[in-house]
Amino acid sequence: MKDTEIIDLFWERDESAIQELRSKYFGYCYKIAWNLLENREDTEECLNDTWFAAWRQMPPHRPDVLSAFVGKITRGFAIDSFRKRQAAKRGVPHGDDVCGETEGLNFSYMVDEQMAEKELVRVIEVFLLKLREADRDIFIRRYWYLDSIKEIAKRHGVTEGCVKTNLCRNRKKLYRMLKQEVLI
């Protein structure tokens, strides 16, 4: 079924919309949640929350890209679940790695106090467009899909060290770009 048809089912409040959404995007959303949580029960709970949230948000929201819409919802629930586990001192090493890497950016004060969300999105989009295709894929795979370094290295046919170096360099580029945008 096409995405527009699934969205129409949501707008018609047809309960089959949830099943159609689940059928089409289960694997995609499962991978997003699994990459952070690495726990079947938590991942499945996250997906159930995703389907319900999609039901609550459509209408009034009509997404332009359904995959991005449900991916963002899934990612949000996965991050929330991860944080709850961290608070309970039951963390996952892979998740710790991703959080530790992005901690170095430390630009939250810039976003909260000096930069609107839309401006932040614009800066990140410009940053990603400036990257070579392979660098962009590595960056997105790590920080959006939360793929492990090992998975990314295998995908690109490079060493894990190469991926780590690539990510480090690009985090620094993003930080400089964000800092420059705020100071201007």
Image (cartoon, rainbow, N blue to C red):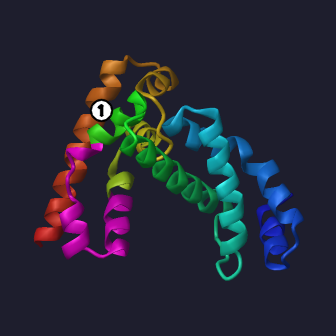
Q: Position of residue 124 (x, y in %)?
A: 34, 59
What residue sits right under mark 1 in the picture? 166
Residue 174 among those drawn in magenta: no
The answer to which of 133 and 54 lies nearer the viewer is 54
Span shown in magenta = 102-126
3 horizontally vs 28: left or right: right
Q: Position of residue 2 (x, y in %)?
A: 82, 60
The answer to whether residue 4 is visible is yes
Quarter occupied by the N terminus: bottom right
Residue drawn where x is 10% and y is 69% of the image:
183
Q: Is residue 175 above or below residue 118?
A: above
**Residue extending furthest toward the top:** 159
**Residue extending furthest toward the bottom:** 60
Residue drawn where x is 84% and y is 68% of the image:
5
Q: Is residue 152 above or below residue 37?
A: above
Name which quarter of the figure residue 115 lies in: bottom left
Residue drawn where x is 89% and y is 63% of the image:
16
Name which quarter of the figure residue 66 lies in: bottom right
**Residue extending furthest toward the front:** 88
Most prominent secondary structure in the magenta stretch? Answer: helix
Residue drawn where x is 28% and y is 38% of the image:
101
Give the residue type that dot 1 points to. Asn
